[in-house]
Image: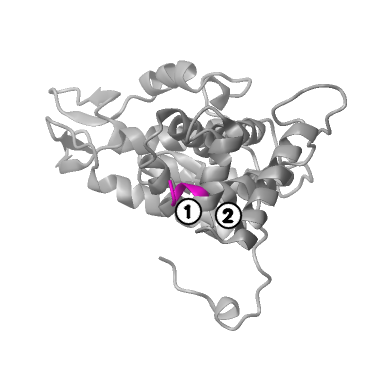
Amino acid sequence: MDTMLFTERNGMRSPIKSTENISSEMYALLLDCCKKYQENLAYKFPEFCPDGSEICGMDIEKFINNLLYDIPTLYGLNIREICEPQINCFSNNKNLDYDQFALLDYIEYFAQNIQDIVNRKWHDYFSHNELRFKENFDSNPKIFEEFQNEINEIFTKTGLLYTLTNNKIIERTIDNEVLTNGIVKQVENIEEDGLKSLLQEAIKLHRSPKPEQNYNAVEKIWDALERLKTYNGPNKKCSLKEILNKVANGNKAFIELFDNEFIALTNIGNNFRIRHHETDKTDINDNKYYDYLFNRCMSLIALVIQYL
C-alpha cells in the first residue's frame, strides 16, 4: 500500500468525495491496471513463439474476438479496440462514449481468469519471454490477490463505491450500510427455504453495481418481509404474534415497538411503488432512497432472524 503523503498525514487534504460514477480519469486507471495483467491470461489466448510451441504472450486479436461476445459494450465505434477515454488537456470535454459497467465486467473477467505464471524464460533470438503455466490451474491463484488489492486500492483512492470481493465479483460499497457479512451468514442458516431464497436474492441485487437493480432489491426484501410474517404458519396474524413475543421475550413495550415497525414497513410497501404499481402509489426517484428503504427493512429482518 502507498505511503501517506505530507498533506494526507497532516490533515491538509480535502476528503475524497464518494461516488458510483466512473470518470474518464478513473476509467483510465482501472483499464491500465488490467493491461498490466494481460500476460496472466495468455494461456487462454496464447501467442506462440515462431520456433516452437512455447507461449510468448497474449494473442490480442483472439482476446478481442472473444470479448466482443462476452462484453460487447466494452467497445466503442471501433469494434477492434476497447473503448478508452481520451483525456485531452486542451479540451473541456474529457468524457467520450464509454460504458462504465462494461469496465466492471472487464475487471471481473480478469479476476475470474488470471492464472499464475510459474516460469519466464528469456528468448534472446526473438527478444521475448516464454511463459509457463501450470497444467492444472488453481481456483485461487496467488496473482488474483495481487490484482484484487491493486483494483481495490484504485477504488479506495478515487472514492469509487465498489469492491472486488474474494468471490471475484464487484459489489457496491454502500454508505451507512446495515448489511454486514454477519447478517449474510445468518441468512444462510435460515431453515425456511423460501425466506432464505428471497433474502439471498435481495442481498445480491442490493450489492449489484448497476443502479437499476436497486428497485429490484427493495421489491425482493419487501417480499421477504411478507414471507417472514408467515414463518410460523399460514395465518399471518397468529404467526406474527408468535414472532413478536419471541423477539421481545414477552416484554409488552418491545412487542409494541416491533409491531409498530412491522406496520410501518407494511404501509411503506403498500403506499410506495415497491410491490404495487397502481397509479396512486408514490414513485421512488432517488437511488439513495432505495438504499435507505432496503437498510430499514433489513434492520428489522436481521433482528428477527436471530430468534427464529
What amino acid is found at the position of numbered circle 2 in the picture?
Glu
Residue 11, how many percent across, how many down? 62, 80
Outermost residue on the bottom side: it is 10
Outermost residue on the right side: it is 280
Residue 266, how many percent across, how many down? 70, 38
Distance, label 2 to label 1, CA atoms, is 8 Å
* Kind of element beneath mark 1: loop
Question: What residue range appears in magenta?
Answer: 303-308
Task: Name above or below for residue 81 compared with residue 200.
Answer: above
Q: Callout 2: few (<14), some (14-19), or many (20+) C-alpha neighbours within 10 Å? A: few
Name the colour scheme.
one colour
| Quadrant holding the C terminus | top left
* Kind of element beneath mark 2: loop
Residue 247, how many percent across, how many down? 51, 54
Task: Name above or below for residue 8 compared with residue 252.
Answer: below
| 174 relative position to 192: left or right | right
- The residue labelled by disc 1 is 180
Residue at x-position 50% and y-position 43%: 171
Q: How many marks?
A: 2
Quadrant of the rendered image containing residue 255: bottom right
- The residue labelled by disc 2 is 177
Instruction: Name the one closer to the observer, 221 or 162.
Output: 221
Residue at x-position 53% and y-position 20%: 72
Residue at x-position 24% and y-position 42%: 140
Is residue 149 inside the magenta stretch?
no
What amino acid is found at the position of numbered circle 1 in the picture?
Thr
Quadrant of the rendered image containing residue 97: top right
